[in-house]
Amino acid sequence: MLSRRSLISAAGATGVGLTAASCGAADSTSTDGPVDFEADSAELSGDVTLLTPDFTGDAAAELKDMIKQFTDENSGVNVKVDQVDWDKLNEKLSTSIAGGLVADVIMSGVGWTPPFAHKKILAELPGDYVDGLGLDEALLGSCRYDDKYYSLPIGMDLRFVVYNKEMFAAKGITEAPTTLDELAEISNELTGDGVVGIDLLTKNIRQAWIHLLYAFGGTLFSEDGLTPTLQEEPGAQATQWVLDLMDTGAIDYDLQAAEGQPTPFMQGTAAMQLVSTADWITWEDMTPELAEKDAAGMFLLPGGNDNDPVMFQGGTMISVGQQSKNQDAAAALVKHLMTPEMLAAGNAATGKVPPTPDIPDTPEITKNYLTDFALQHLDKAGAAEGGSPAWMEIRGNLQPLIEACLTGQSDVQTMLDDMKALCDDAISRI
């Protein structure tokens, strides 16, 4: 079985930062106000460094082509790509901040914007430009700090529930559940004969818990990010919901696929799974029958306490570095990468979801039914990590608290008390 604890140590690294020095144009300097997204392209020159954890492997060629299209139009600008793995990104950012080295354009994760903006690592983006993109408010919430924009969603990893249609039909279940109570009932009904009702934990356990927290109407923090709210009643309800299904066997904590192997849902040992859109590539490679149209049913995680269903958003955000000496060119590159054509090309290459359905058709996106479902429900992508400038210190330390509760090493109230203490301590050092 895959040990989750072995995967979270890097994610728990404290601190935020940036990497890669840039040699900007001598007459372009950083600003305390919004970055200029309307600079004359004829006046742009110098080096721009792009820090990205995406576009690895075969996708690197697509990024190279996207950048070439930019430099063809801006011949005075030279773009340097600094590639770093996701599990090394936070560490690299922290180290580079200490050394005073800054990237001009930064790709980071959902939830990372408030910490980076608070540290004055990300530059403010002009509200009129962001509003003009027409992105859904459910996605834009993760882009703001102190009521200002500091990032944009460029490639999303969205999560919802998939189900085995044959198993539903065998039990006479004809409709997807519309409440968490109904989902629990169906999960129990589908459990038995070597099958668990729902695999909730194959994905990141912390993020699954946060998804449920929002489904019950909760939040992680107050609006200003300075008061934790995750310990309130929805947090208790989310945890108890999982524990109750573990008691009946409808959720099995130990039913986890080894790294690189098919998930229990793919193997037919789970009737439902909280799935990520990023799983599509694995479906195509390992279980191509699931990648056929209508092979799997899909529905949003239902709400509890009369709340609406909700989709979890992860993925990649893009920003301009506050300390960049070539902000005009950096802004121009961000603007280029956020055009519909580049969003289509970039997300087709990375297997992520564009932040808008208003993009040109590409075969990779059009035939991806997980992405298609997600694009139809972007307005429901309201569950997300982050919301506090202290999040980077908090994030990696939450999962052990959740795991301890799910494995019987602590109870629900102890977990929630420990979560609040963790958040209060981190926020006190802002």
Image: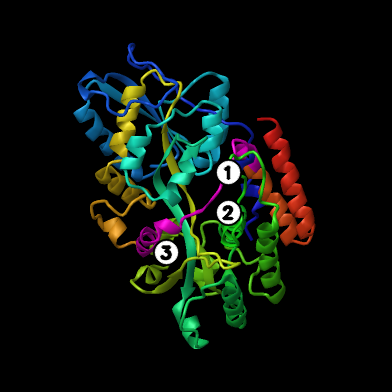
Residue type, label 1: Glu
Which residue does the numbered mark 1 point to in the structure image?
223
Is 18 placed above or below 305 here? above
Which residue does the numbered mark 3 point to in the structure image?
283
x and y, in percent, of residue 119 in the image? 56, 27
23 and 319: which is toward the camera: 319
Which residue does the numbered mark 2 point to in the structure image?
207
Spatial CA span between label 3 and label 2: 21 Å
Labels 1 and 3: the sequence-earlier one: 1
Residue type, label 2: Gln
x and y, in percent, of residue 145 in the image? 51, 36
x and y, in percent, of residue 202 in the image? 57, 61
Q: Which residues are magenta?
A: 369-394
Q: Determine the residue positioned at 25% across, 54% down.
A: 362
Q: Determine the residue positioned at 40% across, 27% down.
A: 34
User: Judging from the image, what secondary structure is the residue with disc 2 in?
Assistant: helix
Direction from residue 218 to residue 262 in the image, left or right:
left
Query: In terms of image quadrants, where is residue 51?
Result: top left
- Residue 75 part of the magenta-drawn span: no
User: Judging from the image, what secondary structure is the residue with disc 1 in?
Assistant: loop
Q: Are marks 1 and 3 in contact (CB under 8 Å)?
A: no
Colour convention of the picture: rainbow
Direction from residue 396 to residue 293 in the image, left or right:
left
Spatial CA span between label 1 and label 3: 38 Å
Spatial CA span between label 2 and label 1: 20 Å
270 and 133: which is toward the camera: 133
Query: In terms of image quadrants, where is residue 239?
Result: bottom right
Labels 3 and 2: the sequence-earlier one: 2
Which of label 3 and label 2 is nearer to you?
A: 2
Labels 2 and 1: the sequence-earlier one: 2
Q: Are marks 3 and 2 in contact (CB under 8 Å)?
A: no
Q: Quadrant of the N terminus?
A: bottom right
